[in-house]
Image: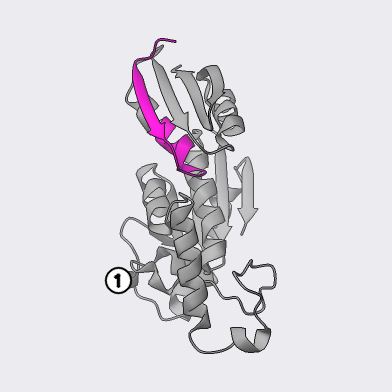
Amino acid sequence: MSKKMAIIASKGTLDMAYPPFILASTAAALGYEVQVFFTFYGLQLLRKDLSDVKISPLANPAMPMPIPMPVMVQMLPGMETMATMIMKDKIKKKGVASLEELRDLCLEAEVKFIACQMTVDLFDFTKDDFIDGIEYGGAATFMGFAGETDVCLFI
Amino acid sequence: MNFDKELNVSSMSCPLPIIKTKKVLSGMESNQVLKVVATDAGAVKDMQAFADQTGNTLLASTEDHGAYIFYMKKK
């Protein structure tokens, strides 16, 4: 019987979007059966359009910036968009896969994506906002699979 | 070393070399050998880990002028 991994993806920023997709796609390649449960801001990662997934330099002192940037500057309009552009450019130059590509690889490898129904309702999302081929469920759905896993992560 | 298929994952970063390797291996026959060329230094440990966990055999892992070359025999 194959090993199993469950991940809770709870963050919706560009940097925090990578670990669930990287681990899920890799585990699937290693023969794991994988489920990812997307809740709260993690739901952003299931949207058809991922352009709202951004990175903010604000309150993120560990983010390497091309030039030192005071917090007063980081809070100006457009800084988040700029930081996101810089990061995406870097991702492309270094040969790191895009989020869309990693997400597609997960789906292709039959990773099961589950959207948390409660937070879908809480944020007034509709099924039309999300990609096809996902399931909807709650905490008990997650526990049903998580209780039998070899690896279980909260991201 | 003889090989049946070659995969070039140069300039790709983790986890793409592993995932592409797995995909190509899936379409190959048992005991066939896949040659993989990568530039990601992390692939050296990852290819061994992939082999250990999937039962495929890493026949050789070498470096040549910044390129990492692997020969993976399918289970």
Task: Report x, y in % for residue A18.
Answer: 52, 57
Residue type indicated by callout 1: Asp
The residue closer to the viewer here, A38 or A60, is A60
Q: Is residue A21 above or below residue B11?
A: below
Query: Mark 1 highlights which residue?
Result: A128
Task: Report x, y in % for residue A97.
Answer: 44, 51
> Given the image, what chain letter belongs to the residue carrying mark 1?
A
In the rendered structure, which segment of residues is drawn in magenta?
Answer: B1-21
The residue closer to the viewer here, A30 or B16, is B16
Task: Report x, y in % for residue A130.
Answer: 35, 67
> Is residue A145 located in the magenta-colored stretch of the structure?
no
> Is residue B18 located in the magenta-colored stretch of the structure?
yes
| Residue found at x 62% / y 73% | A67
| Residue found at x 35% / y 44% | A108
| Residue found at x 42% / y 48% | A106
Q: Is residue B26 left or right of residue A35?
A: left
Q: Within the image, what quadrant is residue A120 found in?
A: bottom left
| Residue found at x 65% / y 89% | A72
Question: Which quarter shows the C terminus of chain A?
Answer: bottom right
Q: Within the image, what quadrant is residue B60 found in?
A: top right
